[in-house]
Image (spheres, grey):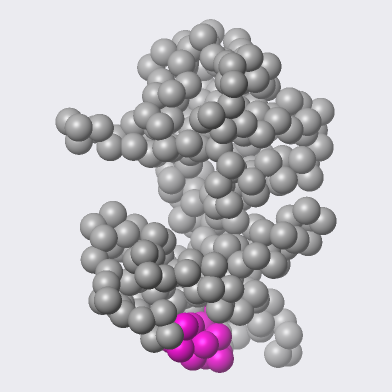
Amino acid sequence: MNVQVIDGSAIAKEVRGDLKNRAKDLLEQGVKPGLAVIIVGDDPASSIYVRYKVKACEEVGIHSEVHRFPENASQDEVQRCIIDLNDNQHIHGILVQLPLPKHFSSHAITTSIAVEKDVDAFHFYNIGALVTGNSTFLPCTPYGVLKMLAKHHIPIEGQHAVVVGRSNIVGKPMALMLLEKGATVTICSSKTRDLASHTRSADILVVATGRPKMITADMVKTGATVIDVGINRLSDGKLVGDVDFAAVKEKVAFITPVPGGVGPMTIAMLLCNTIESAERMQSANT
């Protein structure tokens, strides 16, 4: 089959180009969009992700600031910082880099962020509001997936979408957002009995389990669209997704690579939510 590899890096570049123009328009009105990132501890992967986000902000024209706390910082310290940022008129988006140290309650921290600045959309209000299609912000990774599907004119309405993964960050919101777009949605996990019987029926298959190459060619339908959200580092240092890319791409119509697929879109949609927050606040003040 003549497969089309969905280039997330290229689509993200287009999105950032549009965001750069929107940031410029805001600046002409005296507003510079601002994103605050909070990181606790020195997890290497988290530090890399934060650097990517800061660099992306610079490219688009968003002010960014990183608030770093040591591993042994108290939850109260971090929450006080969030409350200050909630009141800061120059900050339009706040995100807390996960995972947090074990002595933290992620729920308590994320719900300390004002809903109108929750650009990661991890607040229970934004997650819960997906049920009615009225979230203040859409979660960045599922939002990026929808953008990729739209870019390639891949229909969602009436299609059978199977989401493998049930996390609050990707799996659950992804299923709700596909449902809102008119898909018939099946939600599975890595523990689903006879998983292949479900994945083989998918017109759109979204995989987010954190298990390298768990989706093999015999588990997908010919001509399907496969979105691989997973990113895993093998013992040899190579990055791979949750899908056996080399084998599956011979069978499907569309597939995302790892790296270079969903990852760049996640950051692009974070910037999009930040710009949107700044635009809303500016509109409310004029």
Query: Is residue 87 left or right of 64 when viewed as pictured?
Result: right
Q: Is residue 44 left or right of residue 165?
A: left
Against 13, residue 217 (above or below) is above
Residue 33 in sight in this render: no
Residue 266 visible (yes or no): yes
Whether residue 201 is in magenta: the answer is no
Q: Height in image: 37 above or below 244? A: below
> What is the tally of numbered marks visible in this picture?
0
Quadrant of the drawing holding the C terminus: bottom right
* Residue at the farthest left position: 236
Above/below status of 67 relative to 17: below
* Residue 245: image location, x then y, percent: 41, 21
Res 241 quadrant in image: top left
The residue at the point 32 percent across, 59 percent down is 46
- The foreground one among 274 and 234 is 234
Q: Position of residue 56 (x, y in %)?
A: 39, 62
Give residue 237's position: percent from left, percent from top.
20, 35
Between 40 and 149, the residue placed more toward the observer is 40
Q: Residue at x 72, y 60 (%)?
A: 128
Q: Nearer the viewer, residue 235 or 61?
A: 235
Q: Measured from the top left, where is residue 66 in percent x and y?
A: 35, 76
**Residue at position x 28%, y 37% in the image:** 233
- Span shown in magenta: 79-93
| Residue pictured at 43% horizontal, 23% vertical | 214
